[in-house]
Structure formats: C-alpha cells, structure tokens
Image (cartoon, rainbow, N blue to C red):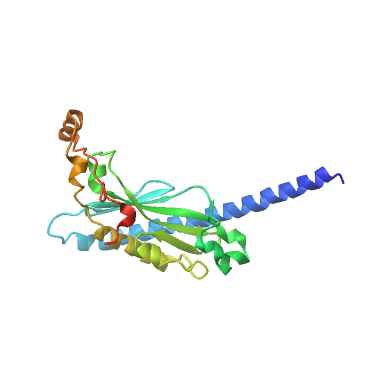
Amino acid sequence: MPPIANDTRSLIHAIIEKGSMKQGVYRTTLEVFNNFKQVVEEFVNTNKGAMKQAPTPLLFEFSDRGTFEFQLKFGSDILIFFMHSNVFEIPRDHAMMKTGYIKEDKNRSYCGIIHIFNFLADSFRYNRTDDIGYCIGRIFVNQENHYFTEGKKEIGLLFNNFAANVLDRKAIQTILHSAILYTLNFDLLTPPYDNIKEVTLAEIQTTLDSVSIKTGKRLGFRFQADIE
C-alpha cells in the first residue's frame, strides 16, 4: 500500500480518536452543568419560605437562560453560571499537568469549563451596561467527571485534588455554598476619589436619566490583590 494511504488511515484514526474524546468531555460537562442547574433551582425552591421571613423583601430566584447559562439572584447580587461550549486542554505549565493522574493519561487534561460570575443585581435592574462583573471561580471537568477549581479564596483552595475529586451532587452543593458565601463577603467598596472627581456633562445627564455611573465591587481597586 502506498505510504500516502497509510498516512491517510492514521490521520483519519487520529481525527476520530481525538474528536470522540472531546465529544465525551463536552457531554460530561453538559451533564454536570445540568446537575448544577437542578441543584441551584432546588436550593431556591427549598429556601423561598425562609427568605420570605426577612424584615424587608429580598431578591431570591433562579433563572434558566438556556443551554449554557443560568442565574442565581439573591439580595443585591447575581451569580451567573456559564458553561463554555468548547473543550480546552490544561496549559502545559499548569501545576495539574505535573500530577501522576494526568501523566498516566494525557486525555485527562482535556476539560470543559464552567464559569461563575458575580454581578450586582442593580446592574441588570437599571440596565447599567458599563458595570463590572467578576469571575469568582471556574470549574474544570474532564471526561471522567473529575474536576478541580480556580477562583477566589475557598473556591480556588478547597477543590484541587483532580485525581480524587468527582463532581457529584454533594460536590456541587459545596461549590455553590462556597460561591454564595464568598459573594456575601465580597462587598461593594467606594471607589478612590480621584477616579470619580471629574465627570462630563453627558455622563451626569445619563446618570440622572438611568443611574448609569459605572459600578463594580472593586472598581478602581486591584481585584487580583483582594485579600479580605
């Protein structure tokens, strides 16, 4: 058989093998994401009664935004859970690439990613499109349903045993509680005076019309250095 035919056979085999592996990662991540949706929706439904006992009405609701997004709204905050539709390989210089778990099987380094973003509820209520949100965590899921997280404080510290961590219902609940707790303690700070001491007429007119001064919990501060 001519060499070109052998090369074609190997090429087709490689396409099928890698494509099938990535499809497996995608399906696993999507299943995990749907489990996240279910857990968050149940969390809201189970605790609605307790929230109604608050001295003043508080925002507390779940919103399904389609295949790749859902939202948890509570108090003055919104957590947006977003699943990327693509599969990623962990960077070669990442600490996880040095683990025996990945060295045994390189395919374990291919992951789907679920992001958790924190926005102010008022940013949506008043359509303040220039407001800032923050990625407080992201979850890496491989084909074997093993996971690790990156993020702020306990979100990034507690879930890093990639070889042992399986993303089951209990793990999802723990991540959810950690994200909510971090958000509750991640307060809105007054921006430095020098950042807002000048304002244009157009900006103040817009502000008076739609309350649209750019707002974010750490606007004007270095979020990466937040060590509260």
Pick whichever, 115 or 71, lies toward us: 115
Task: State the image coordinates of residue 21 (x, y, percent, origin top left).
Answer: 61, 55
Name the residue at the left extreme: 55
Task: State the image coordinates of residue 26 (x, y, percent, origin top left).
Answer: 53, 53
Q: Residue at x 53, y 55 (%)?
A: 91
Q: Which quadrant of the view contains residue 152?
A: bottom left
Q: Residue at x 17, y 29 (%)?
A: 201
Q: Residue at x 40, y 58 (%)?
A: 36
Q: How many marks?
A: 0
The image quadrant where one finds the C terminus is bottom left
Left or right: 169, with 50 as reference point:
right
Left or right: 142, with 154 as reference point:
right
Task: State the image coordinates of residue 192 (x, y, percent, origin top left).
Answer: 20, 47
Left or right: 181, with 32 as reference point:
left
Q: Which quadrant of the view contains residue 123?
A: top left
Pick whichever, 77 or 169, lies toward us: 77
Task: State the image coordinates of residue 217 (x, y, percent, origin top left).
Answer: 25, 50
Name the residue at the top extreme: 202
Name the residue at the right extreme: 1
